[in-house]
């Protein structure tokens, strides 16, 4: 139907309608470019072509988001069909005059899948896919994509940059060249990515739209700019974007570690390199462990000078799932300990260091706390220095920002620490508290790093080493 009225679509939308249906779509780009509107148009065409055999489903993560979508769809389909459009408010379902259905739903957690048991849809769309911190739910939704012979199935995602799912969407889709088909390695499906911006949407007052959007992001102008420009690569709006710069913070992998010498008892402060682990624990979520070096104010094996108090992440051990930065491999503590010990052996450091508070909780099981289990397996953790979460982030930001200054401690991260580089620069802010990291995003490397930055500098066991 909309094909007969191409004047109703903007240029990029019309072009998007021309992408063969065998390709799934990722609609990236900026807010206000007309992604949701295009979604409606794609559903409409599918419905017109296949009548009651066309069953469309569109999900959003939040209920208010779902309500917005419902209003948008009512306006869209209402304009096409007028009073012939039927809408069941209880079920959030449109039935078009030709019998096709468009079901709206909130999909927030695993349990929500029950409602799709045994149901099948010929077109499934995830609007605002960037709100899903992990692709797991989105991927599962695909299992409901089925249609009778002759009815094409299609999966469509629309997303804005800067959300909790920024990292996985970047890895899979967002940075692909627009309009060029590719096979998504994670799902095995053929996709086309389309990135348009609000400037490509002649149906809005673009100048005013930009002004309003910037105003709505007064406390976070970087995020406003990312939304406006649909910029997935620069990661504006990410929590650490203003303090991470590869040229300052990234170092080439060290070939070996400098020697740990006994402290000079007469010196004011540490006189030798110190090495320790920093660990964030997970089983279904990933564990991340770093070998951290604390500089006494000396040159590293790479001949660069690291001011005293600088922290260098030398190596990384992680149980991150290769396809999903927010999912762990489900390894037991002994298995994790084994991996950590092997990393330590490679570098010749002791498997001891700091970890998140939670692993010291007594679980009530015979083996005691997770920290106890680690200890039995030869890895020794103590609590990272107490302090607020925000205080920890602030310390980490300051260290990152000061990297490269000759007289200030900085935070340096080896290129070897791949999960760190894949996740930390991209971490979104918590939408409810812009001062915090969004804890539903893949923040495990950042957490481990934060514990390392809080350091065990003040921990009695280590202090003994410094002052003996
Ligand atoms: N082809 C179109 N015809 C009329 N209005 C449109 C069209 N495409 C987009 N719009 C309007 O532009 C605004 C932004 O579009 P929307 O689809 O919500 O963008 P996005 O989902 O990319 O943020 C909405 O008010 C929408 O109704
Ligand atoms: Mg939208």
Image (cartoon, grey):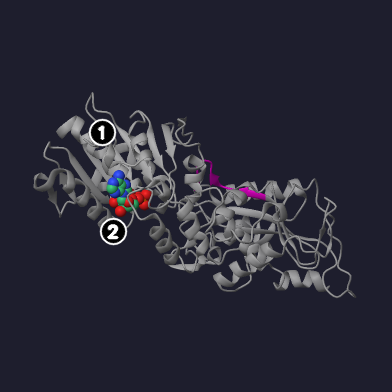
At a point 55% along the width and 71% down the height, the residue shown is: 390
- Which residue was labeled with disc 1? 3
Q: The magenta stretch spans which residues?
A: 316-325
Q: Main secondary structure of the magenta part?
A: strand
Q: CA distance from mark 1 to mark 2?
A: 32 Å
Res 63 label? 2
Residue 162 appears anywhere in the view = no
The spot of residue 465 in percent (x, y) is 79, 69
How many numbered markers are drawn?
Answer: 2
Q: In the picture, which quadrant includes the N terminus?
A: top left
**Badge 1: how crowded within 10 Å, few (<14), some, or many (20+)?**
some
| Frontmost residue, 244 versus 198 | 198
Q: Secondary structure at mark 2?
A: helix
At a point 14% along the width and 43% down the height, the residue shown is: 81
Q: Is residue 31 part of the magenta span, yes or no?
A: no
At a point 18% along the width and 41% down the height, the residue shown is: 101
With 325 as the anchor, is 102 left or right in this view?
left
- Judge whether 271 appears above or below 114 on screen: below
Res 74 label? none
Farthest residue to the left: give it.
83
User: Under 8 Å from ligand 1: the CB of mark 1?
Assistant: no
| Frontmost residue, 108 versus 283 | 108
Give the mark, 1 or 2, whose residue is nearer the N terminus.
Answer: 1
With 235 as the anchor, is 59 left or right in this view?
left
The spot of residue 90 in percent (x, y) is 15, 55
Q: Quadrant of residue 108?
A: bottom left
| Frontmost residue, 136 versus 212 | 212
Residue 298 appears anywhere in the view = yes
The spot of residue 106 in percent (x, y) is 28, 53
Q: Secondary structure at mark 1?
A: helix
Q: In the picture, which quadrant includes the C terminus?
A: bottom right
């Amino acid at each position: 139907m909309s094909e007969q009225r191409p004047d109703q679509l903007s240029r990029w939308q019309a072009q998007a309608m021309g992408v063969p249906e065998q390709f799934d779509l990722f609609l990236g780009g900026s807010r206000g470019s007309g992604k949701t509107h295009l979604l409606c148009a794609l559903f409409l065409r599918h419905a017109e072509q296949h009548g009651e055999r066309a069953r469309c489903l569109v999900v959003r993560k939040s209920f208010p988001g779902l309500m917005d979508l419902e209003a948008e769809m009512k306006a869209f389909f209402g304009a096409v069909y007028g009073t012939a459009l039927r809408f069941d408010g209880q079920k959030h379902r449109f039935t078009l005059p030709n019998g096709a259905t468009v079901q709206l739903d909130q999909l927030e957690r695993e349990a929500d899948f029950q409602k799709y048991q045994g149901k099948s849809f010929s077109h499934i769309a995830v609007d605002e896919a960037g709100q899903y911190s992990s692709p797991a739910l989105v991927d599962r939704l695909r299992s409901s994509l089925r249609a009778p012979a002759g009815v094409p199935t299609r999966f469509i995602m629309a997303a804005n940059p800067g959300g909790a799912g920024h990292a996985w969407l970047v890895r899979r889709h967002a940075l692909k060249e627009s309009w060029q088909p590719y096979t998504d390695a994670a799902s095995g499906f053929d996709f086309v990515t389309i990135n348009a911006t609000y400037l490509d949407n002649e149906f809005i007052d673009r100048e005013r739209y930009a002004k309003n959007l910037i105003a709505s992001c007064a406390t976070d102008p970087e995020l406003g700019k990312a939304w406006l420009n649909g910029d997935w690569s620069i990661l504006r709006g990410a929590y650490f974007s203003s303090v991470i710069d590869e040229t300052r913070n990234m170092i080439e992998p060290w070939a070996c570690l400098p020697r740990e010498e006994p402290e000079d008892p007469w010196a004011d402060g540490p006189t030798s390199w110190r090495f320790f682990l920093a660990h964030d624990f997970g089983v279904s979520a990933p564990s991340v462990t770093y070998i951290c070096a604390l500089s006494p104010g000396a040159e590293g094996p790479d001949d660069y000078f690291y001011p005293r108090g600088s922290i260098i992440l030398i190596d990384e051990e992680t149980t991150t799932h290769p396809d999903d930065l927010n999912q762990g491999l489900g390894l037991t503590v002994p298995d994790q300990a084994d991996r950590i010990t092997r990393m330590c052996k490679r570098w010749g450091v002791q498997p001891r260091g700091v970890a998140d508070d939670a692993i010291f909780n007594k679980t009530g099981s015979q083996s005691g706390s997770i920290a106890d289990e680690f200890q039995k397996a030869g890895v020794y953790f103590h609590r990272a220095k107490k302090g607020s979460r925000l205080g920890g982030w602030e310390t980490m930001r300051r260290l990152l920002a000061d990297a490269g200054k000759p007289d200030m401690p900085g935070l340096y991260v080896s290129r070897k620490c791949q999960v760190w580089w894949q996740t930390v620069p991209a971490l979104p802010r918590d939408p409810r508290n812009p001062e915090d990291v969004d804890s539903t995003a893949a923040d495990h490397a950042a957490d481990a790093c934060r514990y390392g930055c809080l350091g065990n500098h003040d921990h009695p066991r280590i202090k003994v080493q410094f002052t003996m």
